[in-house]
Amino acid sequence: MKNALVSIVIPCYNQGSYLDETVQSVLASTYRPIEVVIVNDGSKDDSLKIAQQLQEKHPEITVLDQPNSGVAKARNAGVDAATGTYILPLDGDDLISPDYLEKGVEVLAQQPKVKVVYCQAVKFNSSIQKPWKLKPFSRNKLARDNMIFVAALFRKSDFIEIGGFSEDMTMGREDWEFWIKMLKDGGEVVQLPFIGFYYRLTQQSKRKKTGTNQKKRERIAYLNAHHLPFFERELNGPLRFQRTWSKPYNTLLKWLGKL
């Protein structure tokens, strides 16, 4: 049976110094066929030039160029242009192992109930490499925090069904909200038992910019506004600022008749 096409979608904003290494990690994959869709999101460095040079060398690569619009819109544009059955989003400075795609597609192809496949991961930079300790998946845990990084495999059909990444979620952790949309009403999740993803730590890492209390409040308000029935089912009420205490606090308020 012929392998299904996998589309690796790489949004890139000022990540020119890492982009070639990221793409090479994809091209080293043991799985074929693949296509690589690089979306230059209005970079001010040489990202577009490097992407176009890579496109000239490798027929699997397509380059899109758009004004700076944010990572959610860049990912959506890349997936919309992608023609693969399966999608892997990959940021322009991160890496994957050669066997990640092959092992991930094997699960999706053989297990229709599985919606998302990811793997173990490490965080790294030029001086350190450390395990990324991810909690086991459950919908209840997902209601309080995200344990699936964005570079996970899923079907394009599921992406279309949920409307892709929410482009108006500009306060960070849009991948968390994406997985809530994908998984809140069912679907199994598989974590592969090996390190297949390498998350690069940089001074420009988005998680640092969106880690303020104000951004957290905005994020929680957005999630409650869009997914309140999910939180009510899993947490007995809305997601709270102290996320771990959401369920006991909501339960107490209901017992006191205040929720």
Image (cartoon, rainbow, N blue to C red):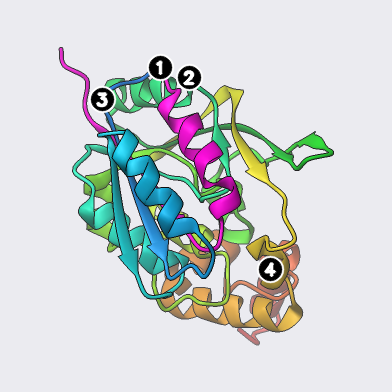
Which mark is first along the chain, 2 or 4? 2
Inter-mark Cα distance, 2 to 1 = 6 Å
Inter-mark Cα distance, 2 to 3 = 14 Å
Inter-mark Cα distance, 3 to 4 = 44 Å
- Residue bounds of the magenta highlight: 1-29
| Amino acid type indicated by mark 4 | Ser
Q: Nearer the viewer, mark 4 or mark 2?
A: 2
On the image, which quarter does residue 2 sit in?
top left
On the image, which quarter does residue 97 sit in?
top right
Tell me the SS state at disc 2. loop
Q: Which mark is residue 202?
A: none
Tell me the SS state at disc 1. loop
Q: Which mark is residue 33?
A: 3
Q: Residue furthest top?
A: 1
Residue 226 forms part of the magenta stretch: no
The residue that appears at 57% across and 64% down in the rendered structure is 173
Q: Which mark is residue 30?
A: 1
Which mark is first along the chain, 3 or 2? 3
| Amino acid type indicated by mark 2 | Asp
Q: Which residue is the site of mark 4? A: 246
| Amino acid type indicated by mark 3 | Pro
Give the x, y percent position of residue 249: 72, 72
> Does residue 5 appear left or right of residue 137 in this picture?
left
Q: Which residue is the site of mark 2? A: 99
Q: Nearer the viewer, mark 4 or mark 1?
A: 1
